[in-house]
Amino acid sequence: LLFFASLFVPLQSFKTMEIQKLLSLFARHPGVKALAKVLQKDSGTAIQLAGLQGSSAALVFASLAEKAPEVLNVPYLFVLDDEEEAGYFYHDLTRFLGDKQVLFFPSSYKRAIKFGQRSAGQEILRTEVLSRLSSGSLPLFVVTHPQALSELVVTKQKLSEQTLSLSVGERVDIMFIQETLLS
């Protein structure tokens, strides 16, 4: 599916109100309507969008979320070429949709500092993505890169077994919490 002339949208120059107008404008574009129709068929066919420059790819999917939210009944995974490109795409999507719908799935390693060392912060982000995916809350957009996908992840069953849920006002033995967290 090929559409859209090259379009560069510098996000820094847009305010929130202008972004909503831009999303509305893009949602009326015939290409977005055609993409919504193809996605509604759920045929499993690979779709390639061409001619998208700068922030316009993120703008297309954000406007799709505005135009046809019914096609967003499954999580969408965006795999970009590398971590930097994925970071820019993630930033653009969060600028359009907010950070509740868009998650970043990073590699769990600190590649820039010392190769092979795990980063606790990035492991937390990975766990958050896996938890949100297993909870089934939609719509959900996950942005990542090949290096992050090549790492093993915990199974859905193991994640649910190892999850400790607490609620406000609940009394729990501190030793139980300590043992659970250590395991």
Image (tube, rainbow, N blue to C red):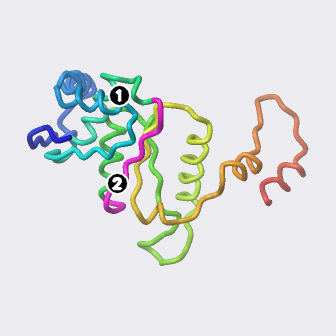
> Foreground residue, 36 or 93?
36
Residue at 58% of width from left, 64% of height from top? 152
Q: Which residue is mark 2?
A: 86
Where in the figure is residue 84, as x and y percent of width and height?
A: 32, 60
Q: Residues within 10 Å of mark 1 (few under 14, many from 20)?
A: some
Looking at numbered disc 1 in the image, what kind of residue is underneath it? Ala
Q: CA distance from mark 2 to mark 1?
A: 19 Å
**As drawn, 163 above or below 35:** below
Give the structural element (helix, strand or loop) at label 2.
helix
Image quarter for residue 147?
Answer: bottom left
Find the magenta span and give its range. Answer: 73-84
Question: Label 1 near label 2: C-beta < 8 Å?
Answer: no
Image quarter for residue 29?
Answer: top left
**As drawn, 157 above or below 121:** above
Looking at numbered disc 2 in the image, what kind of residue is underneath it? Ala
Residue at 14% of width from left, 38% of height from top? 3
Does 175 appear in magenta? Answer: no
Give the structural element (helix, strand or loop) at label 1.
helix
Where in the figure is residue 28, as x and y percent of width and height?
A: 19, 21
Does 75 appear in magenta? Answer: yes
Tell me the quadrant of the picture where the C terminus can be found: bottom right
The residue most toward the bottom is 115
The residue most toward the left is 5
Mark number, residue 65: 1
Q: Judge whether residue 31 can be spotted in this image.
A: yes
